[in-house]
Amino acid sequence: MMRITTTTTTIVTTTTTIEIPHKTPKKIKNMNPIYIKGRIQRMLELRDYWFQHLDEAHVILQKGNSKTGQNCYTVSLIPIADCPNCSGCWDKCYDILNVCFQPDVQNDRARNSAIHKADIRRFWYEVELQLRALFITELRINVGGDLTEEDFYYVKELGKRNPKCDILFFTKNYDGINSFLDKNEFPTNVKPIMSAWPEMEMQNPHNLPCSHVLFADGTTTAPDFGAVFCNGNCSECHFNETGCWTLRKGGHVIFPAH
């Protein structure tokens, strides 16, 4: 496994084993790759349909659920297919294993992906329209899918124009976000977090906060000390000004595998 250090810009390959917290990590499903590819293929087929019906399509934002809390909206794309860098984690993707078997979810992800791929400017314009119309104060981007380097610029502007909305995202697009941050910075209401994963090399020269998974066997990529545990409710943390929303540079958060 790997361990993040806060004093360098690279991953140190060591093994860390920590005591399991009150929320016990679950063993990640071991799904046959054929079934994973089948779910992706179904969403890509639906995306092809929406490419032909873009005039009838609009970006879908999801209301909060049991994990994000009732106040935190989400907007997502197709997992794996819309991830610039997932070669190390695609077969353990929570979203594809536990969420994207539902027909409504597959259709919503495909529709969002079609709009995003066909007209990225329109995609973020529609996100902002709904953000303002629904008075959204918490937005989590990409429960499934990930941001491209071009997306980071749109997220920056989205945050600048909507300072009363806090925007949270996790990314494994290490190269893209580093390239963006070499010349840009996000407003303070945009909360970027690097998502670490075993065997995936992560460069973090800008010392962004990092997230880590705690696996059922007790191993994690998190450092030995200093990481906070996810409490399982984004809205609760936002209200109490704790957790991911308040992580500073060099910070770490741990998610029990689920």
Image (tube, helix red, strand yellow):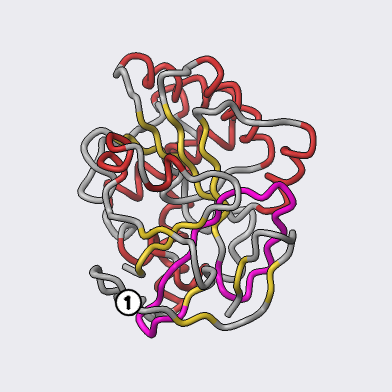
Residue under label 1, please give it.
Answer: 20
**Quadrant that contains the N terminus:** bottom right
Q: Magenta segment: does it hold 43?
A: no
Q: Is residue 172 left or right of residue 224?
A: right
Residue 87, above or below 232: below
Task: Give the total number of marks visible in the rendering.
Answer: 1
Look at the picture and state if 58 lies above or below 22: above
Circle 1: element type: loop
| Main SS category, magenta section | loop
Residue at the spot 41% in from the left edge and 16% down from the top edge: 129
Query: Residue 201 in magenta?
Result: yes
Residue 7 image-quadrant placement? bottom right
For residue 207, side relative to residue 101 (left or right): right
Percent from the top left, x then y, of residue 205? 74, 52
Residue 145 at what x, y percent from top left?
50, 50
Q: Between 226 and 181, which is closer to the camera in this rendering?
A: 226
Q: Residue at x 31, y 48 (%)?
A: 105
The stretch of residues the image draws in magenta is 197-219
Please, what is the three-letter code of the amino acid marked with disc 1?
Ile
Q: Residue at x 49, y 41 (%)?
A: 113
Label 1 Cα neighbours within 10 Å, binned few <14 / some 14-19 / many ≥20: some
Q: Position of residue 179 (x, y in %)?
A: 77, 43
Residue 60 in which image quadrant: top left
Tell me where residue 172 sits by quadrant.
bottom right
Residue sitting at x 73%, y 64%: 10
